[in-house]
Image: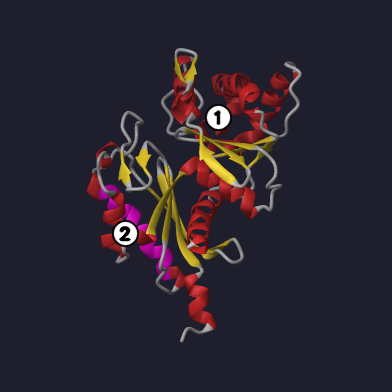
């Protein structure tokens, strides 16, 4: 006979957020819709490493989170960037400047073997969908609202929440300027523009932001991000008609440097729509992925 402790353990999920250069794992209490912060583990990953190295870092992170919790979880929920077969757990990421070595790999079976879990207990969710689910359910947002979620980071993620459901929009692959939106509105896009302006090779947007006070090219690059993001939103808002937009991802941490300009540009087109900044950070994707497990188990 199960006691209260056993029932509590069954309501916990090992949630994971796979980013373009990091992985974060933590235990989620699905009853309280909260991440157990003492279990949160974050590790950097080399997106250009071999498949064995990448999986090694990923599984070590998962195990460390579970060890911090002190108990074995019965379900694993993973927020994963695409292209990816989310049902089968197979990576089709290619041409994205990350995780090329995982192309065609059955990540679900690899995790099942490493974490001693049945494959049916492992579920994957698109990272943009997971982020938006986590933000809405974790912050008790108005679930009757139609919400567009964007994640700005290694890539450009996009999802739409409507009538309690979230779907991936894949707007990062939509035509934009001389390529696709993700070529510009992403870490690589911003840094490429900075180099085009005459800036030096730098590793990330955080470094770019730190240079802004003494580097006019850095300030111009952030200004260009604002223009690109505004143009991108103007390209899609009229069709999607969201009640609000929530912006997350690592680049959103510098929102004070570009979001006011985005709002100003949009307002000149007589569009009035709330542009909000995500409040949960990377925990949103972890919570969002875990909420999928809760939904699936409660529907059975």
Res. 119 mark: 2
Asked if the magenta segment contains residue 79, the reply would be: no
**Measured along the vertical axis of the image, is residue 100 above or below residue 298?**
above
Task: Give the residue pinned by disc 1.
Answer: 211
Image-quadrant location for residue 110: bottom left
Q: Secondary structure at mark 1?
A: loop
| Magenta region | 53-67
Residue at 70 percent across and 34 percent down: it is 243
User: Between marks 1 and 2, how big is the CA–CA gap?
Assistant: 46 Å
Residue at 36% of width from left, 31% of height from top?
Answer: 96
Q: Is residue 47 left or right of residue 219?
A: left
The overriding secondary structure of the stretch rendered in magenta is helix
**Residue 8 position within the rendered picture, expressed as x and y whole percent measured from the top left:** 52, 75
Q: Which residue is situated farthest in the bottom direction here?
A: 1
Label 2: how many Cα within 10 Å (few below 14, some 14–19, many 20+): some
Q: Position of residue 297 (x, y in %)?
A: 48, 63
Name the foreground residue: 20 vs 293: 293
């Amino acid at each position: 006979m199960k006691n209260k402790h056993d029932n509590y353990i069954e309501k916990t999920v090992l949630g994971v957020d796979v980013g373009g250069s990091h992985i974060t794992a933590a235990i989620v209490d699905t009853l309280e819709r909260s991440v157990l912060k003492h279990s949160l583990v974050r590790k950097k990953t080399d997106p250009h490493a071999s498949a064995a190295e990448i999986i090694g870092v990923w599984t070590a992170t998962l195990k460390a989170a579970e060890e911090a919790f002190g108990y074995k979880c019965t379900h694993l929920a993973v927020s994963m960037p695409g292209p990816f077969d989310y049902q089968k757990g197979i990576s089709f990421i290619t041409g994205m400047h990350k995780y090329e070595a995982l192309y065609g790999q059955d990540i679900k079976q690899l995790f099942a073997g490493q974490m001693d879990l049945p494959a049916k207990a492992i579920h994957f969710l698109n990272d943009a969908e997971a982020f938006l689910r986590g933000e809405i359910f974790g912050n008790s947002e108005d679930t009757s609202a139609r919400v567009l979620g964007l994640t700005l980071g290694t890539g450009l993620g996009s999802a739409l929440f409507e009538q309690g459901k979230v779907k991936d929009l894949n707007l990062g692959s939509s035509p934009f300027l001389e390529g696709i939106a993700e070529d510009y509105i992403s870490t690589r896009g911003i840094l490429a523009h900075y180099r085009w302006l005459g800036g030096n090779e730098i590793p990330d947007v955080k470094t770019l932001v730190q240079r802004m006070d003494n580097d006019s090219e850095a300030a111009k690059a952030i200004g260009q991000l604002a223009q690109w993001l505004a143009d991108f939103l103007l390209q899609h808002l009229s069709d999607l008609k969201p009640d609000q937009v929530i912006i997350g991802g690592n680049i959103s941490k510098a929102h004070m440097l570009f979001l006011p300009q985005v709002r100003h540009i949009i307002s000149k087109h007589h569009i009035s729509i709330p542009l909000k900044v995500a409040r949960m950070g990377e925990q949103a994707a972890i919570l969002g992925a875990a909420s999928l497990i809760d939904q699936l188990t409660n529907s059975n």
